[in-house]
Image (cartoon, grey):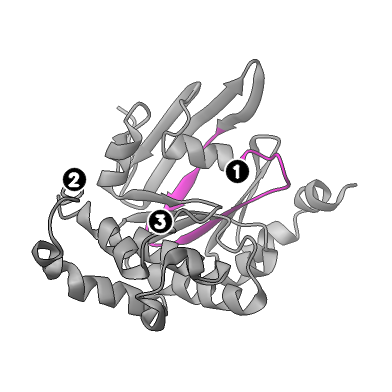
Amino acid sequence: MTSVTDEFVIKTLGLTKEFQGFKAVSGVDLQVRRGSIHAMIGPNGAGKSTVFNLLTRFLTVTSGKIFFNGKDITRDDPADIATRGLVRSFQISSTFGHLSVRENVRIALQRPLNLHYDFWRSDRCLEGLSDKVDELITAVGLQDFRTHTASDLSYGRKRALEFATTLALNPQVMLLDEPMAGLGREDIERIMTLIREAAVGRTVLMVEHNLKVVEDLSDWITVLARGQILAEGSYIEVSANPQVRTAYIGA
């Protein structure tokens, strides 16, 4: 029986996804080391987001296997995968715009505490979550905005709020889909700090186009091109690879 060792929290074997005969991902053998910040990079259309969608089961695998903590999750439901600790944030902020910062975080906290269906409960019944809500809000630097409606936040602060709601699910692995997309320099520095802090005691797998962010944050990098792994290694190793340079800037 195929399994992963404790060294790797995620492993794929021959991961493939076809769309009407077109292979968006083809034979990807990915290994994500436990406790690392692992970046997945590549030119547009390389298959990065498709791999994310396959890992979290938003897409069905055409062939191949996905293992999480040694368990085959290739056919598991997305909700079951999230419950096990493999949690994804999306490229576009996905907060509840009509609710406050505190309410957004509290809703996220209800799921791991088995309160996620109890929206009819009064605020008094949920007061036990208040300390944890405030802790998460402070951790992402939104303590001065806790009563603000999410839709009134700047884009960078919305991303920070999304980060807090992801952390509320207590993930073992955070999958971050272009966490820096649309951010200015100041917000990028803030989110980079959050990622570093969140990575303590957990694993981060991220798709990111900002190569400076990749260089500063990543322990290991997988480069995809045309749905296949082109290169892997440290930033120094992959940036010096002639095939990687060709894939990004042309021959």
Q: Nearer the viewer, residue 34 or 129?
A: 129
Quadrant where the N terminus sits is top left
* Residue 202 visible within the image: no
Q: Quadrant of residue 105?
A: bottom left
Q: Which residue is mark 3?
A: 96
Task: Look at label 1 and name its amino acid.
Answer: Lys
| Residue appearing at x 29%, y 62% in the figure | 168
> Where does the magenta region start and end?
28-47
x, y percent for residue 164: 37, 66
Q: As drawn, is 225 to the left or to the right of 77?
A: right
Q: Residues within 10 Å of mark 3 (few under 14, many from 20)?
A: some
- 3 vs 1, front mark: 3
Q: As drawn, is 192 to the left or to the right of 21?
A: left
x, y percent for residue 99: 36, 61
SS of the residue under disc 1:
helix
Q: Residues within 10 Å of mark 1 (few under 14, many from 20)?
A: many
Task: Look at label 3 and name its amino acid.
Answer: Phe
Q: As drawn, is 235 to the left or to the right of 130?
A: right
Determine the CA span between mark 2 and mark 3: 16 Å
- Residue at far right of view: 251
Determine the CA span between mark 3 and mark 1: 26 Å
Q: Which residue is mark 2?
A: 117
x, y percent for residue 100: 36, 67
Q: Earlier in the sequence, mark 2 or mark 3?
A: 3
Q: As drawn, is 181 to the left or to the right of 56?
A: right
Q: Is residue 249 magenta?
A: no
Q: Which residue is mark 1?
A: 48
* Residue 119 visible within the image: yes
Task: Look at label 2 and name its amino acid.
Answer: Tyr
x, y percent for residue 211: 68, 64
